[in-house]
Image (spheres, helix red, strand yellow):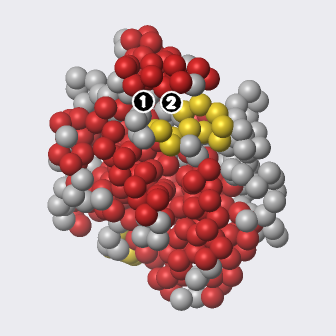
Amino acid sequence: MSEPDSDTEGETITTYELLERSARSALDLQREDGSFPPGRNGVYDEPETPVRTTSHWLTTLSKVYEITGDDVFAEAANDAADYLLSDEVRPYGNTFHSRNAEGKDKCDGLVGQAAPIRGLAWAGSTFKRPELFETAEDVFSLHPFDARLGLWQRVEIDGTNLSFDRTLNHQIIFAAAATSLIDDSKHVKQRVEIFLDSLSDNMRIHPDGVVRHYVRPPLTNVLRVIAKSPSHWPLLWNEFAAHYYARSSEFRKKELGYQLTILAALAHIKRCFPCHHIWGHPRIKSALDFIQTSDYERQIRKQKLNYGSMTPGINYARVLTTFEDPSNREIRPWIELVIDRKYDLETKLLTRETSDPMFQASVVGSLSYLPNIHIKAPSS
């Protein structure tokens, strides 16, 4: 593992101090109903509702309150949580209304539900509000889970059961969010364990270790599911897509971008299931080896990855911290790489170098999953 060159000059602060500064600045963004301005789903530039950004800020505000004990963060977090409990975001009492993209589901697949589940569960624990945890668990449980495939279905906001979410990172991010519920729910823990048991079948990789974008369960299992419920035929498309996109350079760019997104979500799950056999599987090891190649690290340093994480350096540090045993000196430059390029001295938010500043700013909470280490924040 090489380290990125760091040109950052400025004051030395801790990652938690940076979190607090961003959270304090975000208070000015919060609206009267408790929500935060919505993003545009990054490179996809789709109109989103405030659900995902508000959920991300709820997680950050909860963490910063735990750090500081400052009631201003508790008040803002509770207002954000109340917004997520409102009829506006769950108009039918089912899943969260996360996007308004023409021709696409309003639940935004599984990924649109992951952030509010995680945010509500965290806030419920922090502020001793069991109704927040219960809502998160209820929404999770609405999603049908096929134990044979080890996959979840999408559920539209009106309660309609859609077919399986065919995107691998969505399935993994949803499972990662669910880990915030497992201490108090055997039901949730059991499903996440089955998901991990099946991951070696569902997660396919290219020979060099790049993870394929779509889930690809064993064909015999897929055919059994379709024979029982023909509406699940779209899952069969993944089998054809694997061959169709195999030689596509454009599609490879997408897969390269999501490599760290997938591994960071897996790192989150590993902290809750540290002894599961999946972590020793050759596919996981191959995917981890790939991100430590000089070519991939170079792409992170030069911000060449348009898809996936908006803060790849932080995700890289999260993956290393969980799967390796790096020193603070080794992970510090990767965090500083993001802060140096994304942190705006005026807004004190991660709003620079992006076409989606509101969404990018909201994911600063990823620092919560890293050690509280000293970094250099730019001063000019």
Expressed as whole percent of the image width and height from the top left, the position of residue 172 reads: 43, 45
Residue 130 vertical placement versus 38 (above, below): below
Give x and y (percent) for residue 351: 59, 54
What amino acid does circle 2 point to?
A: Arg
Label 1: element kind: loop
Residue sitting nearer the eye, 253 or 160: 160
Residue 63 appears in view: yes
Q: Nearer the viewer, residue 304 or 281?
A: 281
Q: Which mark is residue 166?
A: 2
Give the labeled residue for mark 1. 215
- The residue depicted at 76 percent of the width and 39 percent of the height is 100
What residue do we see at 72% from left, 44% from top?
159
The amino acid pointed to by label 1 is Val
Query: Residue 247, image x and y in percent?
Result: 37, 11
Query: Which residue is located at x 50 percent, y 75 percent?
Result: 63
Extreme residue in the front direction:
228
Q: Secondary structure at mark 2?
A: loop
In the rendered structure, which disc, 2 or 1, sits on the residue that comes first in sequence? 2
Work out whether residue 361 or residue 261 is closer to the camera in this orientation and state it: 261
Image height of 112 relative to 56, above or below: above
Q: How far from the left and from the top, in percent, is residue 49?
A: 74, 49
* Mark 2 touches mark 1? (CB < 8 Å): yes
Q: Residue at x 31, y 44 (%)?
A: 197
- State left or right for residue 199 relative to residue 378: left
Judge whether 83 appears above or below 41 on screen.
below
**Which mark identifies residue 149?**
none
Q: How many marks?
A: 2
